Image (cartoon, rainbow, N blue to C red):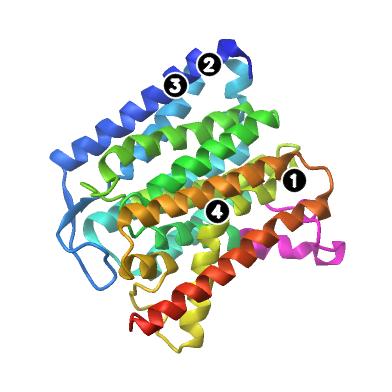
Amino acid sequence: MSLAAFPGLILYFLAILGASAAVTLLLLRRFRIIDLPNERSSHSTPTPRGGGLGIVIGFFLALLSIHLFGGNVLAAPLTTLHFAGFLLAALLIAGVSLHDDMAGQGYASKLLVQLIAVAMVMACGSLIEARQIPWLPDWLAWLRWPITLLWLIGLTNAYNFMDGLDGMAGGTAVVVAACFALICWQQGLPFLALAALAICAGSCGFLLFNWPPARIFMGDVGSTFLGFSFAAFALLAAGNAAPRLLLVMPLLLLHYIFDTVFTFCRRLLAGEKLTQAHRGHLYQLLNRSGLSHRSVSLLYAGLALAQGLAALWFSNATDDHARLWIFLPFLLGYTLLAFRITHQARRNGLI
């Protein structure tokens, strides 16, 4: 990255941050969608939600600015079928999630729309390839279809599940998007770097009003959009002559993925009704055990930063099989931490 590009990048970042903050403030003061506390909530008073719309609008304004001022080379990916499919699918997911924030609807209908959006992305050519997964033999290449489906649907909903504390989802999005932007720039993918930087800036604008104590919540419109966008970014990066980047996003969000999978398995083994609202995620147990919203959000943002540093090394390593070992220390650490948290939660009668 040349020094001459920094003033433009700073202006770009601040403009998106300002747009996101302005939309969030407008939602807070004029178009309030109230989140009433329920059995899954970590808040006790009615609070506006839907602030994630600022992130969505900031992102699309960023793409518009790239189209208008980025030049033919930088704006070229906007015209590709892969990215067009992602944009339409992201709009669809954001739209149905905003409707859910406003009116509420069954989970089955939201999942159906998500499946349609994912099918749209896959039909436009964004698909995990066998060569992008070092341990997948050629005769199992057909698994790329269900793996792609699981990745897109899974991360979309995992990010939604992890949006339960003030500053949690927004703080993590800032760190993950910033790290991914840096990696994409290093790997010669400036358009994706700017797209990720837009997510980072938009999340910063929203976080001004969501950092503990939150004045407004992200809502499904923000959390599902972020999860889906991060999942799609991995496919888009891997499809741009950089197949090793496919596993960068799973590494950047490993703590979110682990928390979601661990909680699902724990509840399944405990015989709990999986469709019932709960507060049994690891981050929720930490909060219910006495840690503040701020402390837990900072912890998860710190873990994202540690994973970001590992992802920087991962993206530049040359040995495909050796790179996979970077996941092991994180997985071991999270496993030990998870059993410690759940053991303490059982002693306290929280689960």
* Marks 4 and 3, the one that precedes in the sequence: 3
- Residue density around tag 1, few if under 14, some if 14–19, many if 20 or more, within 10 Å: many
Q: Nearer the viewer, residue 221 or 135?
A: 135
Magenta highlight: main SS: helix
The reply to whether the magenta stretch includes residue 137 is yes
SS at circle 1: helix
* Marks 4 and 2, the one that precedes in the sequence: 2
SS at circle 2: helix
Mark 4–mark 3 CB contact (< 8 Å):
no
The amino acid type, in three-letter code, at marker 2 is Phe
* Marks 4 and 1, the one that precedes in the sequence: 1
Q: Which mark is on residue 6?
A: 2
**Residue linked to disc 4:** 253
Q: Nearer the viewer, mark 4 or mark 1?
A: 4
The amino acid type, in three-letter code, at marker 4 is Leu
The residue that appears at 45% across and 48% down in the rendered structure is 172
**Residue linked to disc 3:** 12
The x and y percentages for residue 65 are: 45, 21
* Marks 2 and 3, the one that precedes in the sequence: 2
Asked if 317 appears above or below 339 in the picture, the reply is above
Q: Is residue 251 left or right of residue 160?
A: right
Q: Nearer the viewer, mark 4 or mark 3?
A: 4
Name the image quarter holding the N terminus. top right
The x and y percentages for residue 235 are: 64, 47
Q: Nearer the viewer, residue 246 or 302?
A: 302
Q: Residue furthest bottom?
A: 271
Magenta span of residues:
125-149
- Residue density around tag 3, few if under 14, some if 14–19, many if 20 or more, within 10 Å: some
* Marks 2 and 1, the one that precedes in the sequence: 2
Mark 4–mark 1 CB contact (< 8 Å):
no
Asked if 49 appears above or below 266 in the picture, the reply is above
